[in-house]
Amino acid sequence: MFSSLLLPAMNLKCRNIVIICSDLEYFNASIGALLYKYFKKQGFDISIYLTYEIESKEKEYVQQLATNPNTAGFVIFSCMNNAFFYNSFFKEYSIPCVFVDRFLPYLEGCSFVTVDNYGGAFKIGKLLIEKGSKSIACLSMLKDNKISTIEDRINGFKDSHSGLNNLNCFRVELEYGDIMSSIQKVLEEWSRNNTFPDAVFATNHLIMNGLLTALQNNKEWQVKFKDILLSCFDNLPYYDWLNKPIISVEQPINDIAFYTAAILHKKILDPKNFNPNNIILPVKIIDRTKD
């Protein structure tokens, strides 16, 4: 796909693409690898800075690198609680930037590439109900992040069963800094009270991975979850290999990287063009429970 995007190489003074992200788990790493491949072909250098979900680190990296004469542009997977910092920052610095997996429609001079998080979660909720689920647990980690896409997923799931009084759909907020311990506590409580749901929706693959790990280490829970439907926002390749089928929302990673690279490169080549290019891509539901 990237071959059709190649633009004429230019002798630009600024040669470094800066990627700022919280981690290098599957989603971020996959997009980062595709961006690296594209920009390397164009003669750019690529630097990756990890924030580990610490806002002060993100601010520090952005402020420091914006003044570096070699910085050509930013790709940011932001961990900010809100967009206030960037509202003032981009009024001072006119540097090309694309936010990934963040919805920032009112940020002047900035672009974002994300997916239909609300719609994907809504479809998952509807599908679980169609399959007969009456008690659905939504496992989430929100972290009070106002620009996070997780909130859209929570709202999509919630609206999928709006007005249906015969359902017990509830949300379990996990501890952001310690997923495994938090999941363990939830499973222990369900086991103690014998109140297991008949379906689970995990709002990202990190939560699903934690749940699968917890089940693997406890045979009693494995038995309890034998007939519980599992669903997840994000689709990892190894889900195809599991004995336990997982319904998942597949994000178009290749397309996310394609549009991110295209928008950023265009802005680098035409620095006076700071009109925002905002992209919301469709998602695909992978139903592995089909016969």
Image (cartoon, rainbow, N blue to C red):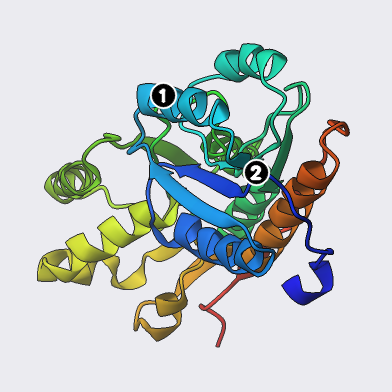
Relative height, residue 26 to residue 65 (above, below): below
Q: Residue at x 58, y 40 (%)?
A: 70
Q: State if disc 1 and disc 2 touch (CB < 8 Å).
A: no
Give residue 244's quadrant in the image: bottom left
Give residue 246's quadrant in the image: bottom left
Q: Nearer the viewer, mark 2 or mark 1?
A: 2
For marks 2 and 1, give the CA distance: 20 Å
Dot 2 amino acid type: Cys
Total marks placed = 2
x, y percent for residue 12? 73, 49
In this rendering, position of residue 63 left or right of residue 272: left
x, y percent for residue 262? 77, 55
Q: Which residue is mark 1?
A: 60
In this rendering, position of residue 162 left or right of residue 25: right
Give residue 152's quadrant in the image: top right
- Which mark is on residue 112? none
x, y percent for residue 187? 20, 50
